[in-house]
Amino acid sequence: MVFSLSKESQAELQLFQNEIAAANPSDLLQFSANYFNQRLEQQRAFLKAREPEFRAKNIVLFPETDEPLSRPQSAQSQSRSRSSVMFKSPFVNEDPHSNVFKNGFDMDPHEQDAHQPLKEEQQHGGEKGSTPPLPMHFNAQRRTSVSGETLQPNNFDDWTPDHYKEKSEQQLERLEKSIGNNFLFNKLDSDSKRLVINCLEEKSVRNGSTIIKQGDQGDYFYVVEQGTVDFYVNDNKVNSSGPGSSFGELALMYNSPRAATVVATSDCLLWALDRLTFRKILLGSSFKKRLMYDDLLKTMPVLKSLTTYDRAKLADALDTKIYQPGETIIREGDQGENFYLIEYGAVDVSKDGQGVINKLKDHDYFGEVALLNDLPRQATVTATKRTKVATLGKSGFQRLLGPAVDVLKLNDPTRH
Ligand SMILES: Nc1ncnc2c1ncn2[C@@H]1O[C@@H]2COP(=O)(O)O[C@H]2[C@H]1O
Ligand SMILES: Nc1ncnc2c1ncn2[C@@H]1O[C@@H]2COP(=O)(O)O[C@H]2[C@H]1O
């Protein structure tokens, strides 16, 4: 029998396949569970924000149940159900998701599932301003995980719906022009993009005013539509940026104080996104790489001197590769293109005529000698176990390692 899937289902499956191809998960079931949980939570967040609109059309998205999901729970039952939705992987280090959510971000466990991988653009949104079509047999309240607790609508109790305001056609047009192609939005599916756009708040800022003060708590993430801003760290100007750029993500990502002061250097038109929407929607998509690599970069001794900002920029430029035992990663004499950070695994470093001269493992690095000295590869590097590496291209190596380059030079194994 031949099954014919709807276009929507085919698109969904294609996106899912893309995610698998990109992440190459070692634990496929874990990955799939997290992925679809995330999809469902996104859909729910989107619908929750638009609930009044649906109600006006007599569509009940979140019907009352006999056993209200929002009832207060005993501490014991809470902790039981929380742990059951965490989808703990038996492969810990090898699960790409375990790195994303190893509590390194001080996240509420309720928030964690929201940051699993997202998918590329999906084409099933309704027209602008109209109620999006619902799948047949749609039930927004449907359970999503073993206990369902993480994804219940009441998890959005702290969601501030007053931030959600349908944008006018004119505002949408402006947004599309100024930030529609921004990397922040490229990775969002149409529902999430719409949700984020409708949660943006327009802010006009006068030339010379301070938008963010270093050390303050983070409340909003900003995208610049018009104007320019300067960034100061400890009163030293470190950066400036203009239309289409964004700032203010670090404090929201890491729950840390603002890392810089941001001052308008002309009259500015900004779009501000509240912390919770940022964390629920943007963090797991647009900033996915930062989450993925944060643990690795924070624990690598050679990168100790980098600031949070440096690490974030570095993470943006990294890619993941997995090598099987016996696979050659670098061949002696070749031209150097990448620098490698070992997330987990083991490699042998060998030289023609000398055999194995070094062994490297988790959180070590290699491939720097050719890039630092503009030389051919000085040794062959071969995986001896399944090895996951983060790679950094030559131009990123030269731009993004900052003070870590001095440490690499000092430790150059060919120096003596
Ligand atoms: N060199 C820099 N160091 C720290 N923050 C910077 C730098 N350049 C730009 N920024 C931005 O300034 C923002 C200040 O607030 P956040 O720390 O939330 O996020 C910060 C970054 O988005
Ligand atoms: N003793 C060593 N001699 C040369 N390369 C080494 C040695 N130990 C580790 N390596 C790594 O092996 C890598 C091979 O490629 P590169 O020469 O770019 O950079 C080299 C170093 O990162």
Image (spheres, rainbow, N blue to C red):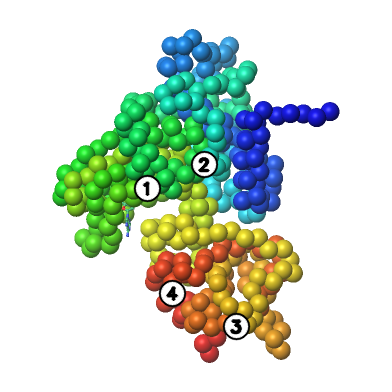
Q: Is mark 3 within 8 Å of ligand 2?
A: yes
Query: Which corner quadrant of the image does residue 370 belong to?
Result: bottom right
- Disc 2 packing (10 Å; few <14; some 14–19; many ≥20): many
The mark that comes first in sequence, 2 or 4, is 2
Q: Residue at x 50, y 52 (%)?
A: 289
State left or right for residue 262 relative to residue 44.
Answer: left
Q: Amino acid at mark 2?
A: His
Callout 2 secondary element: helix
Label at residue 115: 2
C-alpha distance separating marks 2 and 1:
15 Å
Label at residue 249: 1
Callout 3 secondary element: loop
Q: Amino acid at mark 1?
A: Glu
Find disc 4 in the rendering and name its residue. Answer: 405
Give the label, 4 or 3, closer to the camera: 3
Residue located farthest toward the right when viewing the structure as drawn: 1
C-alpha distance separating marks 3 and 2:
40 Å
Give the label, 3 or 2, closer to the camera: 3
Q: Is mark 4 within 8 Å of ligand 2?
A: no
Most foreground residue, 269 or 153: 269
C-alpha distance separating marks 1 and 3:
40 Å
State left or right for residue 92 relative to residue 203.
Answer: right
Q: Amino acid at mark 3?
A: Gln
State left or right for residue 344 relative to residue 46.
Answer: right
Label at residue 378: 3
Callout 4 secondary element: helix
- Disc 4 packing (10 Å; few <14; some 14–19; many ≥20): some
